[in-house]
Image (spheres, grey):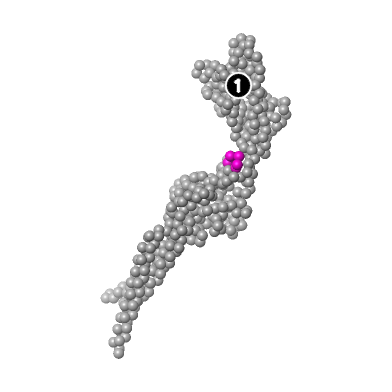
């Protein structure tokens, strides 16, 4: 009977508008929740097979989802470990149970943003209990070839193991000038001694002593120097290497390195322009320049001038702060200025963001409806870059929600009116019997 189906349709209308009201209430309540993704309800009609001469109302049903792919506005903060994504993608996280579980059993969750801080165990987590995951890097910042279709290679980010750090010196650039007048006939031939500080593999300060001795010819100019290298961390009298350098005096490249002959444990690569010696803590390269062009080591008509002697490496330093760059590389910054990459934070992507299951605390879990996960490097492929000092605001638009609230209220009242009308019609039918 059509009148009964009208009653059922009115009841269904009340139910779905109650669902819509619930999503609106949730959105308004979380309008200031960082990283919140608004909930929504969409209605679909129920169509029954109709018989000739009659019509039965099928009613309506509601489908709810969270728009996990929506982008909230970014706000700046004062914390370098407040992390957001400028575009598509989600950050991999886990809960407290996942931190204590093996990688194969760890639940992989996803969130769009997080105000992370270091807890008492040195792990980066949010106040709501989400722990940041990443791929650990080696000293060069490489993560190798981790699995990208699962979280099996991800580890909870832990930084207290790197409270102190040092970087050994592996390269010295010998930017100095040797006096051209010292290699002409009649020059005194006095040597020049240049101490160069370097850092060993324990962060200790050590010294290389380089002695530059000019070759004085009987006539003319030799343009030649003999260089002896002593590592004071080892024997203070025995050189660890030596090289003879002849400078070019042609008009085009005059004063630059012409030819180099290494000896006594040292080697020279003309392609890179580097002399390699072995110190007490390992190999060390000294950049003097390649033949036939501009070089760090020169012989010009000027004084002995070590003005641009530089080196890499750093002494022992205390961890100062943690930063993340646009590529997702989490770097420890020490008070000596030394920077060490610790983890690379990937950005997760799924085919259907609306298919993700909301699990609370602005986190989502992969489902069959969302499709399989893929972990991209930040800023690569379809995903956005990672941004420190930033959080993503709620995607709730208060004006839009209040407009939906008015419409839902009117729709609910209209469906209630249907029930009231059906009740009155049934009452009239009952009155016929009297």
- What is the crowding at mark 1: few (fewer than 14 residues within 10 Å), some, or many (at least 20)? some
Placement of the C terminus among the 4 image quadrants: bottom left
Rendered residue at 54%/16% (across/down): 249
The residue most toward the top is 219
| Residue 36 falls left or right of residue 3 | right
Q: Within the image, what quadrant is residue 107 found in?
A: bottom right
Residue 245 in picture, x, y percent from top left: 61, 21
Which is the main secondary structure of the residues drawn in magenta? Answer: loop
Residue 189 seen from this side: yes
Q: Within the image, what quadrant is residue 96 found in?
A: bottom right
Residue 352 in picture, x, y percent from top left: 44, 56
Rendered residue at 68%/27% (across/down): 230
Q: Which residues are magenta?
A: 334-339
**Magenta span includes 244:** no
Q: Which residue is mark 1?
A: 304
Residue 317 in picture, x, y percent from top left: 63, 41
Residue 418 in picture, x, y percent from top left: 33, 75
Judged from the image, the secondary structure of the residue bearing numbered disc 1 is: loop
Residue 105 vs residue 290, the one in the foreground: 290
Q: Is residue 68 above or below residue 379?
A: below
Rendered residue at 58%/26% (across/down): 307
- Count of marks placed on residues: 1
Rendered residue at 33%/72% (across/down): 414
Residue 161 vs residue 336, the one in the foreground: 336
């Amino acid at each position: 009977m059509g009148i009964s189906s009208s009653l059922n349709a009115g009841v269904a209308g009340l139910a779905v508008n109650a669902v819509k009201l619930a999503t609106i209430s949730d959105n308004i309540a979380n309008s200031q929740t960082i990283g919140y993704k608004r909930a929504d309800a969409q209605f679909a009609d129920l169509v029954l097979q109709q018989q000739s001469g009659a019509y039965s109302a099928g009613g309506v049903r509601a489908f709810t989802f969270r728009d996990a792919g929506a982008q909230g506005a970014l706000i700046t903060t004062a914390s370098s470990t407040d992390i957001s994504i400028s575009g598509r993608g989600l950050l991999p996280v886990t809960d407290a149970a996942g931190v204590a579980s093996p990688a194969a059993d760890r639940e992989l969750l996803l969130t769009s943003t997080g105000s992370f801080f270091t807890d008492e165990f040195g792990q980066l987590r949010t106040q709501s209990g989400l722990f940041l995951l990443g791929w650990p890097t080696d000293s060069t910042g490489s993560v190798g070839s981790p699995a990208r279709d699962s979280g099996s290679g991800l580890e909870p980010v832990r930084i207290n193991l790197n409270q102190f750090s040092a970087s050994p010196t592996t390269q010295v650039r010998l930017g100095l000038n040797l006096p051209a007048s010292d290699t002409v006939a009649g020059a005194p031939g006095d040597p020049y001694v240049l101490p160069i500080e370097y850092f060993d593999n324990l962060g200790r300060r050590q010294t290389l002593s380089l002695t530059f001795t000019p070759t004085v010819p009987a006539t003319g100019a030799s343009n030649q120097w003999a260089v002896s290298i002593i590592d004071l961390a080892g024997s203070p009298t025995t050189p660890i290497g030596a090289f003879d350098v002849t400078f070019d005096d042609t008009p085009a490249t005059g004063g630059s390195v012409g030819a180099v002959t290494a000896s006594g444990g040292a080697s020279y690569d003309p392609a890179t322009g580097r002399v390699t010696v072995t110190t007490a803590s390992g190999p060390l390269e000294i950049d003097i320049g390649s033949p036939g062009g501009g070089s760090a080591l020169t012989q010009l008509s000027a004084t002995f001038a070590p003005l641009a002697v530089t080196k890499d490496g750093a002494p022992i330093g205390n961890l100062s702060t943690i930063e993340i760059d646009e590529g997702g590389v989490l770097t420890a910054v020490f008070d000596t200025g030394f920077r060490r990459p610790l983890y690379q934070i990937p950005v997760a992507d799924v085919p259907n963001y609306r298919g993700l299951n909301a699990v609370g605390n602005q986190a989502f879990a992969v489902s069959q409806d969302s499709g399989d996960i893929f972990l991209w490097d930040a800023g690569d492929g379809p995903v956005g870059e990672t941004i420190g000092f930033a959080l993503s605001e709620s995607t709730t638009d208060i004006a839009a929600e209040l407009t939906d609230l008015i419409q839902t209220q009117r729709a609910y009242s209209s469906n209630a009116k249907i029930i009231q009308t059906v009740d009155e019609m049934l009452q009239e039918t009952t009155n016929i019997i009297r």
